[in-house]
Image (cartoon, rainbow, N blue to C red):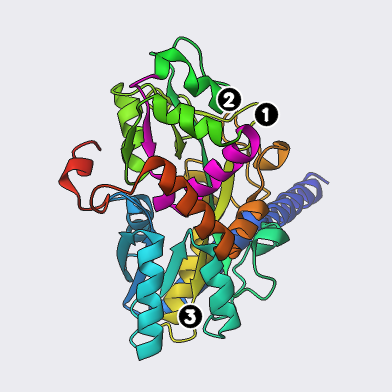
């Protein structure tokens, strides 16, 4: 009798262990890991490297991606180039025309390019694992292009130095901010330009006149303004990105306006039909959308199933931001260029070299 009970007990433990093991292998997380491993095994047999071109306005913008790739996929070398999206897209067009395409994947701010490239038939349709968690209104239904991470441009203030955290763009017009703002030229960056369009729509052109009277420091690129606020050299900025975690932001707090509109857009990625290392490119697009990589990004994820970033709830909970409005803004190039000329007439022409190479800008980082 004791022997029989013992056999039943052992059998039950083995069955339970097998069930638990089966349950673990069937979790979405494990399925994602299995798919990434499958793609890696396939890619490393045919591709020894991959080249990523990413939009950015400071050296090292994509180092977090490069570092993680090298840890996860040591058998495939990754080459990363960062430059302004409006420069990279022009080079891609030239290379497509001459059949000399260099990047295997591009991820850019210029979302209108992806719509155009799809209409020209040059993009590879690929739907990465987990892509069903991305809202339909920011991805291509055929998989021609897919968002890789969300970026938000609102306000950033040094919470240790300002008397009160600004709640609206109008607050930046108060006396404490005179000579204490550092701002990106809006007519040098379409994303920043969008934010200024929303501000003018709400406050009128008088806001720009009053902002100019604050004597801000105008600069190319969005990295230096954030850094200067974090260092305490300026009190605040707007139209730049930051970290959605007060324990990691170094004092440069991302401030989402209570009522004013702010910008949230999806940095978008794609593979081309003439991509040389297509297997590695598909691995990259799947990996960058993985829960691991989306969790490492300092702002919101493009996936709906990711947890909130500290106290910053999902962008979908804010009625005053809309990624699809930004897409529509970018697609209407005539209206965009017209507004850009109006802003330039107010502020003056852009001064300085590329934010990636100009020594005067780099020393502010």
Task: State the residue in front, 34 or 20.
Answer: 34
Secondary structure found at label 1:
loop
Residue 200, compared with residue 58, is above or below; it is: above
Q: Is residue 192 magenta?
A: yes
Residue at point 54%, 81% (across, down): 124
List the residue tagged with mark 2. 168
- Residue 101 coordinates in the image, percent (x, y): 36, 82
* Distance between the alpha carbons at the discs numbered 2 and 3: 42 Å
278 with respect to 5 (left or right): left
Of pointers 2 and 1, the one earlier in the residue sequence: 2
* Residue 178 can be seen in this image: yes
* Residue 46 can be seen in this image: no
How crowded pointer 3 is (Cα within 10 Å; few <14, some 14-19, many 20+) is rated as: many
Residue at point 47%, 31% (across, down): 209
Residue 318, compared with residue 236, is above or below; it is: below
Work out which residue is located at the far top of the displayed protein and give it. 163
Q: Quadrant of the C terminus?
A: top left
Q: Is residue 189 magenta?
A: yes
Residues in magenta, as a range: 178-203
List the residue tagged with mark 1. 259
List the residue tagged with mark 3. 272
């Amino acid at each position: 009798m004791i022997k029989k009970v013992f056999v039943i007990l052992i059998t039950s433990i083995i069955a339970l262990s097998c069930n638990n093991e089966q349950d673990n292998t069937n979790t979405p997380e494990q399925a994602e890991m299995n798919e990434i491993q499958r793609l890696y095994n396939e890619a490393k047999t045919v591709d020894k490297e991959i080249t990523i071109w990413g939009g950015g306005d400071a050296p090292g913008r994509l180092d977090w991606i490069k570092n993680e790739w090298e840890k996860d996929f040591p058998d495939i070398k990754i080459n990363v180039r960062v430059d302004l999206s409006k420069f990279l897209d022009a080079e891609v067009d030239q290379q497509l025309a001459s059949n000399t395409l260099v990047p295997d994947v591009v991820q850019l701010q210029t979302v209108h390019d992806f719509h155009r490239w799809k209409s020209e038939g040059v993009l590879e349709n690929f739907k990465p694992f987990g892509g069903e968690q991305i809202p339909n209104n920011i991805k291509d239904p055929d998989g021609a292009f897919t968002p890789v991470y969300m970026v938000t441009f609102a306000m950033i203030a040094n919470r240790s130095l300002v008397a009160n955290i600004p709640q609206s763009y109008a607050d930046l017009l108060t006396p404490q901010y005179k000579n204490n703002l550092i701002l990106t030229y809006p007519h040098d960056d379409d994303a920043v330009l969008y934010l200024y369009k929303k501000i003018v729509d709400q406050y009128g052109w008088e806001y720009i006149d009053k902002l100019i009277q604050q004597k801000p420091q105008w600069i190319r690129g969005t990295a230096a303004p954030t850094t200067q606020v974090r260092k305490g050299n300026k009190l605040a900025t707007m139209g730049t990105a930051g970290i959605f975690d007060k324990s990691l932001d170094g004092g440069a707090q991302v401030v989402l306006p209570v009522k004013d509109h702010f910008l949230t857009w999806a940095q978008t990625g794609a593979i081309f039909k003439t991509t040389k290392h297509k297997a590695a490119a598909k691995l990259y697009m799947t990996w960058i959308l993985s829960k691991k990589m989306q969790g490492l990004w300092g702002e919101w994820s493009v996936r709906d199933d990711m947890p909130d970033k500290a106290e910053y709830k999902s962008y979908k909970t804010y009625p005053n931001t809309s990624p699809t409005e930004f897409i529509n803004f970018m697609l209407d190039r005539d209206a965009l260029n017209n507004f850009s000329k109006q802003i330039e007439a107010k502020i003056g022409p852009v001064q300085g070299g590329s934010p990636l190479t100009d020594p005067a800008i780099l020393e502010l980082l």
